[in-house]
Amino acid sequence: MLSPQAFATHMARAVDLFRDPGAKEGQKSALRALMALVEQADVLVETRDGVLLINGTRVPGEAYQALVECLDLHAVRHIEIPAAAPAAELFHLLKSLAEPPGGDDLPTRLRATGAQRVSVAVARLFASDAGVPQGDVLVEHTPVLPEPAATLVPGPDLGTGGLLHGELGDVGSLSAPLDVGPITREVPPPAPPEPPPPSGAEPAAITRASVGKAGDDDVLAQLERSPQGADVGDLLALVGRQVETAVKIDRIERALKLLAVVVRLEAKVADAPRRQYGIALKRMLNKQMLQGIAHLLDIPAHREEGALVLQRAGADGVEVLLDILVSAPTVKERRGAFDALTRMTHGTDQLVHMLSHPQWFVVRNIAELVGELGLEDAVPALGKQVGHEDERVRKAVALALAKIATPNCAEPLRRALRDKSPVVRMQVALGIGGRKSGALAMPLVVALDEEKDPEVERELILALGRIASSDAVQALIKFAQPSGRLFGRKPTALRVAAVEALRLAATPAAVGTLQGLAGDADRQVKAAAQAALVELNKKKR
């Protein structure tokens, strides 16, 4: 799960670094950190009453005020960054935010770069078009092209090589938006209501004859009115024939609607009729049907019902979704399958076996999935892939282990924290959060003593703050001091990170340390401690 605080911290720092043309290395590090977070989930950035919001969660603090002021300066209403947004688009977004407002607004600047995925909405106080009244007018840049098709091996690794020197490198050029026009869909008019029965009369029984004459919607309406009546078997048989007909004439959307109604009704009825629903659904949910439904998951209008029916299919549904996750031709389809798999409750044991797949991108996709599911049974298999030859796999494995965060994750995470790639070590730090990760505190402390990369070191410190166990807080207290036996003297920037981590921990020991640091000789540490105490006091009110 994306940490709003972690994203806000990295975005604020990235925008600040992009204001300095000479800070190329810092810009690369900041962009890599943001890319790692965006891989986890969609992100919505807003401001409200002078406070930053990430995915609807308020992220208050002095550290984010410069970013809030920057968004206000550009009149930004909100920024939408989809999961796995291209590195080039994140780069152009940060660059545009760091530049002062000019003749073109932020959406226009992004549009000029060919951005397809990142969306920005701004408010103009005065509309310039003739005939448009003055007032608060929303101007938005939203992507209009579907995502370009990819090969079976997902697109290029989104590294940052060349981006900060004005070259897009292997990210590829982005074509101009194409307006495909509105998509309309014919909706049949609702059936007229049936006249009420005479006063005192019993409702007419549902007979085979009346069922046989009923249209699709009539059968559903009768089934919903009497989901466990005497003729429920006949009604379900009719629905089954309607589903079969819909598939034959290539109306899989209609078949999905019928199946979703049956699945929802099955969950509401008593045990005896539920067996009839189970038999009917077993006949209808064949592999061909499930494959057709799975390919509708990338269409928002069918996503909810599709996931519901596939979840009801159990292990068969998981098998179909895994096939798509491995072989779908577009990232969009794979994302739909991935999201549906995170809702599955049965059949996930197949995932563990796929972690030994020979193709790197399959292992990466499955590692990401078991991390989202928190699948503890997958930890031994994940541990075997910590040393995978492909960095992209090691990165996904490290993040999955950090998300699962059970005690048996500690040993493979120790190895991940010694990985030769700082990107992999960063994933461990970004993924760890919450007090369930208490068993990982000491491995992080040991890793901090060995870590040489300042960006990774900072993230490990913040991870200790999110863990907030007594061991984690004691390590942070020593780290926040100007010197200490455990860590030795550390740069001001990392002492400030320890102060921020103590604020996240917010335990009595952490607060007491912050009170002491509020008079520190280092001005930056002192200011950070004072700001942290102000924020903690606000939360108490």
Image: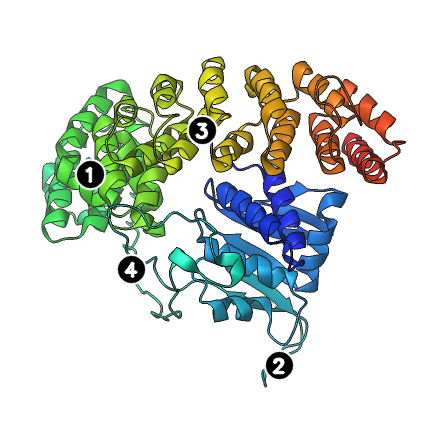
Q: Residue at x 57, y 27 (%)?
A: 433
- Seen from the viewer's position, the closer of residues 282 and 482 is 482
What label does residue 15 carry, if any?
none
Residue holding disc 2: 128
Residue 161 in the image: x percent, y percent?
46, 52
Q: Judge whether residue 386 can be spotted in this image.
A: yes
Q: CA distance from mark 2 to mark 4?
A: 38 Å
Q: Is residue 356 left or right of residue 84?
A: left
* Among numbered discs 4 and 1, the one appearing first in the sequence: 4
Q: Residues within 10 Å of mark 1 (few under 14, many from 20)?
A: many
Q: CA distance from mark 4 to mark 1?
A: 24 Å
* Comparing labels 4 and 1, the label whose residue is closer to the camera: 1
- Seen from the viewer's position, the closer of residues 428 and 64 is 428
Q: CA distance from mark 2 to mark 3?
A: 51 Å
Residue 514 in the image: x percent, y percent?
81, 27
Q: Amino acid at mark 4?
A: Val
Q: CA distance from mark 1 to mark 2?
A: 51 Å
Q: Amino acid at mark 2?
A: Ser
Residue holding disc 4: 187
* Comparing labels 2 and 4, the label whose residue is closer to the camera: 2
Q: Amino acid at mark 1?
A: Leu
* Among numbered discs 3 and 1, the one appearing first in the sequence: 1
What label does residue 290 carry, if any?
1
Relative to 496, say whether 16 is above or below. Answer: below
What label does residue 398 carry, if any?
3
* Among numbered discs 4 and 3, the one appearing first in the sequence: 4
Residue 148 in the image: x percent, y percent?
31, 58
Q: Residues within 10 Å of mark 4 (few under 14, many from 20)?
A: few
* Comparing labels 4 and 3, the label whose residue is closer to the camera: 3
